[in-house]
Image: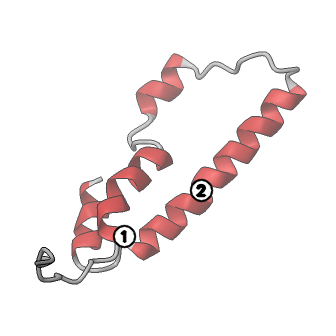
Amino acid sequence: MRADQHAAGLGFAPVPAGVLDKLHRSDQQRTATARALNRSVPLKESPLSRLLSSHPDHYTRLHHLQPYLQPYAPQQPPRQPPR
């Protein structure tokens, strides 16, 4: 996530966000297909797979990039109350 935040700080947030979004959607589709073929029996990730996983999931990485993707609102002067 540090690499994502570094890229985002340099102004490149939309690039990794687009890639992560595509990967996240692909994972969701793959999981849905596997569940359908497995007759809705929950799929379990093996302990070895969890141990070897070195990156946070795509959703978590996207969530941490969100602040860099929000457009900056221009500063507006405070409203004067009517007299």
Q: Which residue is mark 1?
A: 69
Disc 1 marks a residue whose amino acid type is Leu
The spot of residue 75 in percent (x, y) is: 16, 81
Nearer mark to the viewer, of 1 and 2: 1
- Residue drawn 80% across the image and 33% down it: 34
Give the side of residue 69 with respect to residue 6, left or right: right
Q: Residues within 10 Å of mark 1 (few under 14, many from 20)?
A: some
User: Is the residue under label 2 in contact with that under label 1 (CB below 8 Å)?
Assistant: no
Quadrant of residue 2 within the rendered picture: bottom left
Frontmost residue, 58 versus 53: 58
Q: CA distance from mark 1 to mark 2?
A: 18 Å
Q: Is residue 38 above or below residue 77?
A: above
Q: Residues within 10 Å of mark 2 (few under 14, many from 20)?
A: some
Give the side of residue 15 with respect to residue 64, left or right: right
- Residue drawn 61% across the image and 61% down it: 22
Q: Which residue is mark 2?
A: 23
Disc 2 marks a residue whose amino acid type is Leu
Frontmost residue, 74 versus 83: 83
Quadrant of residue 9 within the rendered picture: bottom left
- Residue drawn 36% across the image and 70% down it: 69
> Which of marks 2 and 1 precedes in the sequence?
2
Kindly state the secondary structure of the residue where label 1 is placed: helix
The spot of residue 80 in percent (x, y) is: 11, 78
The spot of residue 49 in percent (x, y) is: 52, 28
How many marks can you see? 2
Give the side of residue 48 with respect to residue 13, left or right: right
Q: Is residue 47 above or below residue 15?
A: above
Frontmost residue, 52 versus 22: 22
Kindly state the secondary structure of the residue where label 2 is placed: helix
The spot of residue 17 in percent (x, y) is: 45, 66
Quarter of the figure with the C terminus: bottom left
Q: Is residue 70 above or below residue 55?
A: below
